Image (cartoon, coloured by chain):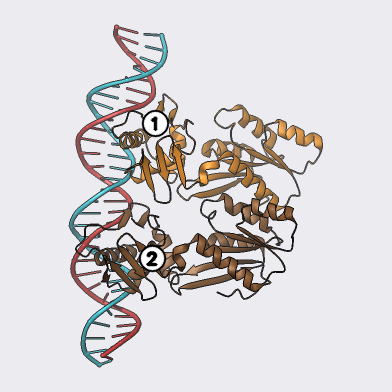
Chain colours: A brown, B orange, C cyan, D red
Amino acid sequence: MIIEDEESIVTLVKYNLEKEGYKVFSNSNGEKALEHIKEIAPDLILLDWMLPNLSGIEICKILKTEKKHKHIPIIMLTAKGEEEDKIRGLNSGADDYITKPFSHKELIARVNALLRRVNPSVSEDIVEYEDLKVDRIERKVFREKKEIKLGPTEFKLLNFLIKNPKRVYSREQLLENIWSDNINVENRTIDVHIRRLRQAININSKKNYIRTVRSAGYALD
Amino acid sequence: MIIEDEESIVTLVKYNLEKEGYKVFSNSNGEKALEHIKEIAPDLILLDWMLPNLSGIEICKILKTEKKHKHIPIIMLTAKGEEEDKIRGLNSGADDYITKPFSHKELIARVNALLRRVNPSVSEDIVEYEDLKVDRIERKVFREKKEIKLGPTEFKLLNFLIKNPKRVYSREQLLENIWSDNINVENRTIDVHIRRLRQAININSKKNYIRTVRSAGYALD
DNA sequence: TTTGATTGTTACAATTATGTTAAATTTCTA
DNA sequence: TAGAAATTTAACATAATTGTAACAATCAAA
């Protein structure tokens, strides 16, 4: 992952399932950045202290009060190197604090460290949940060590759900994360793919794994 | 949360359970604003000093004398910067006092600070009360570590009540917060859902948890 | 081009949830 | 304690949500 423009003031990093890599967005206006954050829910935010309209500290505080965004890791970037400033920054909810000037290498190292800590299974090549195994390198899925053939969409679905087992995702969230480009897809379509995935997983087995949460969505469970 | 129109004179901020975010309403007439406040019982009010029909100070005083609304935090916005005015404003019951011109970011910071103080558990993913546990991420409810199956409405009900244990909510408040869209629902319907929730919770257990307050409403207790 | 796999959509069936009613019960008050 | 008011409860019809199968369109590989 390369952060192209070191000058950009707010940088959002978001994993894209389809491309299987991180995408980077930049924004130099505090207020707009906050909107953008709420819109895309990035996996990580690099935040300058000084910003037009809304300071980094303020954005940080606002995000940390909101359930939907409080978990997003934030790295504060700033020229302020005073001990006191660091404490203020971290107290406002930032996960890390880097003072300028910093080396590009160090920044990337810290970004990767945070991403790994926050979402370990995103970056893992092989993820297992009970007797299910997803191998992202070989693009294969196993149940009880036997391979299961999945179509691309079913693979993405399972791959997504297994990142946070037990967590319930709404159909909207699944659309955003798995279809991303072409959002004009019916809700029912998701159900159909869930069904296909279930069918494929349940080879002469009892456990369903995919829980339907009525009026909410689906979860791997 | 973004307050779009800084010119609007009374701004009501209300948390919406279904959308899981704050909604903002505006009103430029004092009298109408008061009605609206009583109708929706917002979580926070931004109040201008000067208003047609009914001044901000008057609204503030009225609300603070009413049991049902006295807990709502109020921020007074005004051009009057005199020490004396500030004291008058705060004495009339306002929780905070901001003089124009003020920065948008300061306003947002203060709003969020108040909301956090007043409604701290809104944003928590997992809430517990005695041997009850509500997990909003997995959308599961537990009693004594055993899972309890709830329908969507029962889940919302419990989820709402557990945010402020022991606080009594009227049927009207429950309607507003849980049914929100379609308010044309009989009061008796709430009772029925309360019953279903009780039934689900009381798996071979003694404690009821849901207290009926005659001619007032229900509370988790 | 043909073949087969994959995809999104629709219609309908199955399931689950919801709101209403009315009767039974409890609680309050005179 | 009788009667009124409020709440609980069960039953039921209706509504909403989800599951399923069949189909047509698209795409990729042979």
Q: Position of residue B130 (x, y in %)?
A: 43, 34
Q: Which mark is residue A127?
A: 2
> Viewed as shown, does residue B141 lie left or right of A23?
left
Q: Position of residue A207 (x, y in %)?
A: 25, 57
Q: Position of residue B153 (x, y in %)?
A: 37, 43
> Viewed as shown, does residue B51 lie left or right of D15?
right
Closer to the camera in the image, A139 or D17: A139
Q: Position of residue D15 (x, y in %)?
A: 30, 48
* Residue C29 vertical placement versus B56 (above, below): above
Measure the alpha-carbon separation of dots 2 and 1: 41 Å
Q: Which mark is residue B40?
A: none
Q: Which mark is residue B209?
A: 1
Element carrying mark 1? loop
* Residue B104 vertical placement versus A124 (above, below): above
Q: Quadrant of the C terminus of chain A?
A: bottom left
* Residue at image coords 52%, 42%: B121
The amino acid marked with disc number 2 is Val
Q: Is residue A121 visible?
A: yes
Circle 1 Cα neighbour tier, 10 Å, few/some/many (<14 / 14–19 / ≥20): some
* Residue at image coords 45%, 48%: B18
The amino acid marked with disc number 1 is Tyr
Q: Is residue A12 visible?
A: no
Kindly report which numbered mark, 2 or 1, lies closer to the viewer in this rendering: 2
Closer to the camera in the image, B15 or A71: A71
